[in-house]
Every structure is written in structure tokens, then in C-alpha cells.
Amino acid sequence: MLKMNTDSRFFNGLAGLEIENRIGLLLHRYADFNFEINDANGSILFWREMVTNSDGTAEPVYIKVSRGEENLFIWCFFLAIAQLAIDGLEAYDWVQYLYIDDPISSLDENNAIAVAADLARLLKDQDRPTLPAMESEAKAGRPQ
């Protein structure tokens, strides 16, 4: 389970924006697990399979995802929110910059390339050229 910082302004605008669908479209390019976000307590739960309980209702079998899978999920969450900011949605019109800290060291090589390509496409296709992106180089595997 992950916990969101529910005091952050980034999570204030999520209601009604189908954020789970937006994240899911990205996440399923890289991973084979599902998730659900509980807005009430700020938790995110993960699962790979569903089981049918005694009353015939399907329910998820929750799992602990690996650190790499967790990082992929966080990147997909970031990309989904970045898209909302780039699109200029009212809930994120206060965002002036996309700051990308430690962009690839937390992902394996294949996923780093795939996520970087999605991020580049997102930035290239933006209709809001006034939203610049900045990257931190301190932790990106380059000599200091």
C-alpha cells in the first residue's frame, strides 16, 4: 500500500478527473498489476488477480508490489498529473513548471527508456508552451 500526502495541492484537484483511468492507461504499458485509490484516506492498493467470494462478488487479492513496480506507478501518476497541468485544467492551472527530479535512476533500463519516451511525447505535444520542464541532474547517474 502507498500513502498519498493528502495535504499536497497536487491531490486536491483529482476528484472528478478520472485519474485512475488516466494512470491505468499509462501503467498497463509497463506493468501487469492493477490499483485502486482511496481518496478518503489517501491510500493506494495493488492487485494482480480477482477472486470470487462466497456471495459471488469478485474482489481483488491485494499484494505488495516490488520497489520497481512502485516506482513505475509513481511515474505514471506523475505523467497523468503532468498531462492535466499541460492541458491547462482548472484544477492545475496554478502549475508553472514541471520539475523532474531523479528521472531515471529509480527505473530499470527498459522502463526508463519507455517512460522517458512517453514524457518526451507529452512535452512535445503540449498545447501549453508556457509550462517549461526542468530536470534535476544531481541524482541522474552523472558525475557530480
Image (spheres, rainbow, N blue to C red):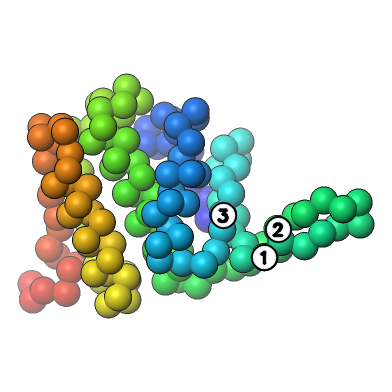
Disc 3: CA contacts within 10 A as few (<14), some (14-19) or many (>=20): some
Relative to 101, residue 125 above or below? above
How many discs appear? Answer: 3
Badge 2: few (under 14), some or many (20 or more) residues near its Cα, within 10 Å? some
Tell me the CA gap for discs 2 and 1: 6 Å
Q: Position of residue 109 (x, y in %)?
A: 27, 77
| Residue at figure coordinates x 14%, y 65% from the top left | 138
Q: What amino acid is found at the position of numbered circle 2 in the picture?
A: Pro
Q: Measured along the vertical axis of the image, is residue 108 above or below residue 30?
A: below
In terms of depth relative to the viewer, which is nearer, 96 or 33? 33
Element at label 1: strand
- Residue at the spot 11% in from the left edge and 74% down from the top edge: 142
Is disc 2 in contact with disc 3, using a CB cutoff of under 8 Å? no
**Label drawn at residue 49:** 1
- Which residue is depicted at the point 34% across and 49% down? 78
Please, what is the three-letter code of the amino acid marked with disc 3?
Answer: Phe
Q: Residue 40 carries which label?
A: none
Q: Residues within 10 Å of mark 1 (few under 14, many from 20)?
A: some
Q: Name the residue under label 2.
A: 60
Q: Assess whether mark 1 and mark 2 are in contact (beta carbons under 8 angstroms).
A: yes
Residue 128 spot, x, y in % from top left: 15, 32
x%, y% of residue 40? 61, 36
- Among the two numbered marks 2 and 1 on one chain, the one whose residue lies closer to the N terminus: 1
Measure how far apart labels 1 and 3 are at the Cα level: 11 Å
Q: What residue type is labelled 1?
A: Glu
Please identify the quadrant where the N terminus is shown.
bottom right
Q: In which quarter of the image is residue 75?
A: bottom left
Chain-order first, disc 1 or disc 3: 3
Mark 1 vs 3: CB contact within 8 A = no
Which quarter of the figure has residue 41? top right
Q: Helix or strand or loop: what does disc 2 sit on?
A: strand
Label ID, residue 35? 3
